[in-house]
Image: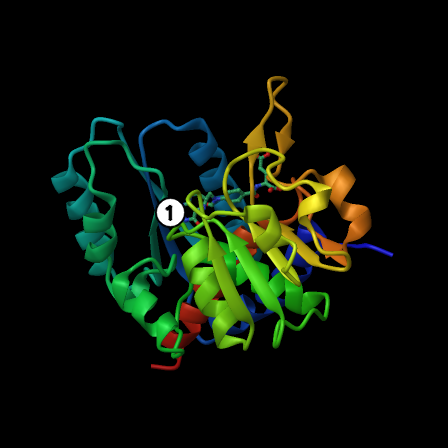
Amino acid sequence: MTIRLDGNQTANALMNTLQGQVAALKTAGVVPGLAVILVGDDPASAIYVRNKRRRAAAIGVASTVYTLPATATQAELLAQVAALNADPSVDGILVQLPLPPQIDAAAVIVAIAPDKDVDGFHPVNVGRLWTNTPGIVASTPYGIMALLHAYGIHVAGLHAVIVGRSNIVGRPLAGLLLNHDATVTIAHRQTAGLAALTRTADLLVVATGQANLITADMVKPGAVVVDVGMNRDAAGKLTGDVDYAAVAPKTRAITPVPGGVGPMTIAALMMQTVALAERRANG
Ligand SMILES: Nc1nc2c(c(=O)[nH]1)N[C@@H](CN(C=O)c1ccc(C(=O)N[C@@H](CCC(=O)O)C(=O)O)cc1)CN2
C-alpha cells in the first residue's frame, strides 16, 4: 500500500516539540527572534511570509517582518540586513525570494551574517553542507529530510534522482542526501533521456515548476516520490510536478501537493530558528 507522506501532520507534530523547546529557552531568558525581509508585492511571497509569521507566533518565536517597497534599492535592502546583523535579539534573518529585478539576490545573501542565515543560502553555509559539517541548511531540503525521517524512510544506499538544480532545493538536497549515504544524481533541463534516468530512482525528488512533468511510466515501482512543485492551473488549483493520481499507486510513498513539502519548509525554518536561539543560549 502507498504511504501518503503528510507534511501538514508531520509539521504539526514538530511544532509541538518546538513549543516545548521555546518554553525552555524563555525560562532561561532567551526569546528566539526571527527577522523576515519582504521586498515588493509578490502575492505568493506575501502568503508564505504570513504563514511563517503565524507558525512562529504559535510556538512563541518572536518574528518581525520588514516590508520594503518593490522599488527598494539594493543599498536600502543591504542597510536593513546590516541593522539586523547587529541586533542581538535576532537569531535568524531571511530575505524572502524572489527579489525584484533591480536587486542582486546573491549580494544580499552574502551580506547576511552566516550564523544568522536561517535559510542556509550563504556561501559559508553552503560550504559547510558540502564539507559535511552542516550548520544551517536550506529549509525545503531540510524539511524533506525531516519528512522522510518521520516516516522511517532511510536514504542510505538508495539511488536518489533529483530533477531540478536550484540553489533553494536541488543542490542543497543533493548535499544532504549525499551526507546521509545516498547515491545522488541531479537532472535538469539539458538532461538527455530523463525518463530512463528517473526509472532508476529509488527516491525521486522533483522540483522543476512544470506541472505533471513526471508520469507513471517515468517511475520505478516501489519508489519514494517527493514532489516539490507548486503550479497553479487555469482554475487556480495547486498541483505539483508529478501526476499524483497516476503515479501514487506505483510508489512505496509519495508527497501530496498541497500538504506535502510546503508545510515542512516552514517547519524546517522554525526548527532552525530555535536551534540558532539554543546556540545563543548556550553561549
Ligand atoms: N527566502 C526564501 N524564499 C523562498 C523559499 C525559502 O525557503 N526561503 N521557499 C519558497 C517559498 N516558501 C517559503 O519561503 C514556501 C512555499 C510554499 C509553502 C507551502 O506551505 N505551500 C503549501 C501551499 C500553499 C498555497 O496554497 O499556495 C503546500 O505545499 O501545502 C511554504 C513555503 C520560495 N521562496
Q: In the picture, residue 211 is in which quadrant?
A: top right
Q: Is residue 131 visible?
A: yes
Give the percent coordinates (x, y) of residue 34: 39, 55
Q: Is residue 61 visible?
A: no
Residue lying furthest right:
1
- Which residue: 15% across, 34% down? 73
State which quarter of the image contains the C terminus. Answer: bottom left
Q: In the picture, residue 158 is in which quadrant?
A: bottom right
Tally of numbered tags: 1
Give the percent coordinates (x, y) of residue 7: 66, 52
In the image, residue 281 sits, relative to residue 19, either above or below, namely below
- Which residue: 41% across, 44% down? 190
In the image, residue 57 sits, relative to residue 277, either above or below, namely above
How would you rate the neighbour count of disc 1 (Cα within 10 Å): few for under 14, some for 14-19, many for 20 or more? some
State which quarter of the image contains the N terminus. Answer: bottom right
Q: In the picture, residue 275 is in which quadrant?
A: bottom left
Q: Please name whichever residue, 143 or 116, is drawn nearer the observer in this view of the structure.
A: 143
Residue lying furthest top:
235
Q: Is mark 1 within 8 Å of ligand 1?
A: no
The residue tagged 1 is: 64
Q: Is residue 133 left or right of residue 150?
A: left
Give the percent coordinates (x, y) of residue 138: 43, 59
Q: Please name whichever residue, 4 or 190, is drawn nearer the observer in this view of the structure.
A: 190
Q: Please name whichever residue, 29 or 219, is drawn nearer the observer in this view of the structure.
A: 219
